[in-house]
Amino acid sequence: MVPYRAMLDVPHEVVEHVSWLIYARRCELNSRWRKLGCFRQALLVLVHLRKNETLAQAAAGFGVSTATAGRYVSETVDLLAERAPSLHEALRELPPEGFVILDGTLITTDRIAADEPYYSQKHRHHDLPEHYQQYNRNHARLRAPGERAFARLKQWQILRKARCSTNRIGRTVAAVHAIEIAWRSG
């Protein structure tokens, strides 16, 4: 593989935020020297999450082994996931007039052997009577702000096709959510 320089569509402040979290964790653990500094580790993880580059591709681009890149990604995803609000915390912060929209996004993975085949059968198309179609149009107007938030999450390529263990997808989504919160809170 040949490494190349590329742009990542994430603000510099987000990379700095993640790198400070990594720095704090390293200090907390009294961690020894690492191949990459905190900023470069944060950048490697964000490249992996945002662009869904394989660990081998990200490792080659940053001059580390695939195993090291995997450890960096796992460590940082766990660190970020710890900071994502739980469902209960998010509901407690909801204003009294607020409402919740849950998304049923299916995240494809190449780890089908890890799971039993499961299909919820919710992705079917149905012909609906006109009064249901009008109801759905009205309901869609109310859901639009939440749908925009889900669309932002889906811009993270790692959520399009996960290469990680199916047991790690929830932590990865939580990590991306924590990054988005930092990004939006500025």
Image (spheres, rainbow, N blue to C red):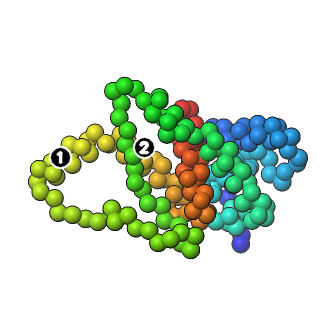
Mark 2 vs mark 1, CA separation in Å: 22 Å
Residue 4 screen position, x and y as percent: 68, 63
Residue sitting nearer the eye, 29 or 40: 29
Which residue lies under the disc numbered 1? 135
Query: Which part of the image, by quadrant, shows the N terminus?
Result: bottom right
**Amino acid on which the number 2 mark rests in the picture:** Ala
> Residue 106 at x, y = what percent?
44, 60
Q: Residue at x 78, y 60 (%)?
A: 68
Specify whether residue 115 is in view.
yes
Say which amino acid is labelled 1.
Tyr
Image point 68% across, 44% down: which residue?
79
Query: Which residue was labeled with disc 2?
Result: 149
Q: Quadrant of the C terminus?
A: top right
- SS at circle 1: helix
Q: Quarter-wise, where is residue 38 in the image?
A: top right
Label 2 secondary element = helix
User: Dot 1, crowdedness within 10 Å: few (<14), some or many (≥20)?
Assistant: few
Position of 177 with respect to 59 (left or right) is left
Q: Residues within 10 Å of mark 2 (few under 14, many from 20)?
A: few
Q: Looking at the image, which residue is at 54% across and 32% down?
A: 185
Q: Nearer the viewer, mark 2 or mark 1?
A: 1
Look at 34% across and 66% down and name the residue there: 121
